[in-house]
Image (cartoon, rainbow, N blue to C red):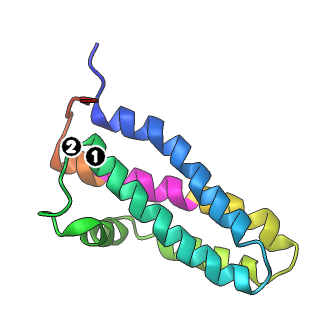
Amino acid sequence: MPKYCRDQARDELWLMMGGGAAVGVAGGVPVIGAFTFNAGLIAVQASVVTRIAQVYNVDLIPAGGAGAVAGAIIAMGGGQLLFRMGGTIAGFIPGIGQVVQPAIGAGAVKAFGEAAIAYFENMYPDKIYRSD
């Protein structure tokens, strides 16, 4: 039975959410962690876009690169600002940031990944995943 790209991307997205949680843990240092959280989250989200593009067998270079695609996905998703603000604010509060930021990081990666999947699924509906 063939597997669709969207299903493969969602399977891998659960693993990529660990990167968002790790960014939250790294951002658990009060004040400095707020800035570390945002920078790390951007890096994780760029890798999410790159991997989902690979699942859909899309070369990002002609498409303007991962940054351009990520910008389009962020514009489409819209909710990333709330995740960033919440993570940043939590990073300034000792104790709270260490508990809240990993959850916010994982949630931000999940939401961003779902938006990326919707973006690629809109361009390539019902595409069959090939692992070669």
> Residue at label 2?
57
Name the mark on residue 39: none
Give the residue drawn at x 40%, y 64%: 46
> Residue at label 1?
54
Taking depth in this image into account, of 81 and 10 the one nearest to the observer is 10
Q: Where is residue 123? Give x, y as percent.
A: 16, 50
The N terminus lies in quadrant = top left
Task: Farthest residue to the left: give it.
Answer: 62
- In the rendered view, would you say 10 is above or below 106? above
Circle 1: element type: helix
Q: Quadrant of residue 68?
A: bottom left
Give the residue drawn at x 77%, y 72%: 28
Q: Where is residue 60? Give x, y as percent.
A: 20, 59
Q: Residues within 10 Å of mark 2 (few under 14, many from 20)?
A: some
Horizontal side, residue 99 vs residue 50: left or right:
right
Horizontal side, residue 111 vs residue 103: left or right:
left
- In the rendered view, would you say 70 is above or below 6? below
Q: Main secondary structure of the magenta part?
A: helix
Give the spatial CA distance, label 1 vs label 2: 5 Å
Residue 111 part of the magenta-drawn span: yes
- In the rendered view, would you say 53 is above or below 96? above
Give the residue drawn at x 72%, y 85%: 32
Q: Which residues are magenta?
A: 108-118
Q: Which amino acid lies under the numbered mark 2 shown in the image of this protein? A: Asn
Circle 2: element type: loop
Taking depth in this image into account, of 83 and 129 the one nearest to the observer is 129
Q: Residues within 10 Å of mark 1 (few under 14, many from 20)?
A: some
Q: Are marks 1 and 2 in contact (CB under 8 Å)?
A: yes
- In the rendered view, would you say 6 is above or below 110? above
Give the residue drawn at x 38%, y 40%: 9
Q: Which amino acid lies under the numbered mark 1 shown in the image of this protein? A: Gln
